[in-house]
Image (tube, helix red, strand yellow):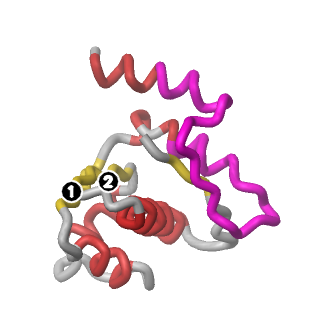
Amino acid sequence: MLGFSKRVGVCSVLDSDMWGLYEGLLSTWSLHIHYLIAETDSLDAYRLITEPDVVCGGSTLLPHILELISRPWDVRVQHICRSSNGLADRMANLASPSDLLIHRYVDPPHVCRDIIVSEAAVSVG
């Protein structure tokens, strides 16, 4: 499991979710991972990515995300309920307000371990 945090500045909730998907896809691609299940708790982001010709409006990141998905690898984007995505929220809050660099984590930060255990218990149970 990999994680990251990045401050994206002032933007819409949708764009924040799209940044998370974009950075996650880009990081995974750079690690030569060939199979990925990308999860989002944003129904709007999910619909934009899975139904780009149907959904009106959008994000300037959409073409970049679609290009990443179209590369030669197996990517599945799925929508999950917000209550199952506490880890992503906790990771997002690790980003420093003044730092626009991305921080990647191979091992989960200590402040995230409790939520990993609780979310794993819910997904198994």
In this view, the residue in front, 96 or 84, is 96
Label for residue 53? none
In this view, the residue in front, 13 or 92, is 92
Query: Residue at point 24% right, 77% down?
Result: 55
Q: Earlier in the sequence, mark 2 or mark 1?
A: 2
Asked if 92 appears above or below 44 in the picture, the reply is: above
Q: Position of residue 45 (x, y in %)?
A: 36, 65
Check disc 1 and report the residue beneath it. 76
Q: Position of residue 38 (x, y in %)?
A: 32, 53
Query: Residue at point 35% right, 41% down?
Result: 81
Q: Amino acid at mark 1?
A: Arg
Magenta residues span 88-117
Q: Where does the N terminus fall, quadrant-wise?
A: top left
Check disc 2 and report the residue beneath it. 38
Side of 81 relative to 55 (left or right): right
Asked if 46 appears above or below 107 in the picture, the reply is: below
Circle 2 sits in a helix, a strand or a loop, which is it? strand
* Residue 102 colored in magenta in the image: yes
Query: Residue at point 27% right, 53% down?
Result: 36
